[in-house]
Image: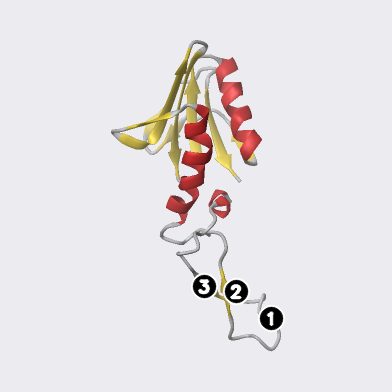
Amino acid sequence: MAFLYGILPANEIMFIEQPLGFEELSKHNWVWRLLTSIYGMKQASHIWNKPFNSAAILGWNFMQLSCEWYVYICCSSTGTIIFSVHIDDIFFTASSAAKNNHFAALLKSRWEISELRPTKFTLRIAFSHNHSTCTISLF
């Protein structure tokens, strides 16, 4: 449900047909104006990423890698956190379990998330097992 966090800008007006079973009586041929992005919209991930990136992640002192826009890093005197975003999933690792917990808490402070088991494989990338690699899904 992460894409539902993306509020459509006023200059991007989108309409959809009323879904079957949700038509309003006597208005069956009307359409709905969307206020948020939804899955299936071509720009949904872009619209969701704007507030995710600027309002939260960059405010938490993360930097985007210039060579890969969906990989972020934050280095501090207490450790390092690296994460990547794939659609609405975040794969992250940290220099310690405490930093991992801190990052998960930051995400939970802004969004409803579901913490999944440690990542084994994603996008044909294998992850080694350790205490500081996690996968979450934003809701």
Amino acid type of the residue that numbered disc 2 sits on in the rendered structure: Pro
| 18 is higher (above) or lower (below) than 57 | below
Query: Dots 1 and 2: beta carbons under 8 Å?
Result: no
Mark-to-mark CA distance, 1 and 2: 10 Å
The one nearer the camera, 19 or 106, is 106
Q: Write the residue at 57% across / 42% down.
A: 138
Is 112 on the left or on the right of 6, as rendered? right
Check disc 3 and report its element: helix, strand or loop.
strand
Judging by the rendered image, the residue that carries numbered circle 1 is: 24
User: How busy is the neighbourhood of tag 2: few (under 14 within 10 Å), some, or many (20 plus)?
Assistant: few
Judging by the rendered image, the residue that carries numbered circle 3 is: 15
Query: Dots 1 and 3: beta carbons under 8 Å?
Result: no
Amino acid type of the residue that numbered disc 3 sits on in the rendered structure: Phe
Is 76 on the left or on the right of 110, as rendered? left
Mark-to-mark CA distance, 3 and 2: 12 Å
Query: Dots 3 and 2: beta carbons under 8 Å?
Result: no
Question: Tag 3 or tag 1, which sits nearer the N-term?
Answer: 3
Quarter of image, res 43: bottom left
Q: Nearer the viewer, mark 1 or mark 2?
A: 1
| 110 is higher (above) or lower (below) than 76 | below
Question: Tag 2 or tag 1, which sits nearer the N-term?
Answer: 2
Check disc 2 and report its element: helix, strand or loop.
loop
User: How busy is the neighbourhood of tag 3: few (under 14 within 10 Å), some, or many (20 plus)?
Assistant: few
Mark-to-mark CA distance, 1 and 3: 15 Å
In the current view of this chain or complex, which residue is farthest to the top? 77
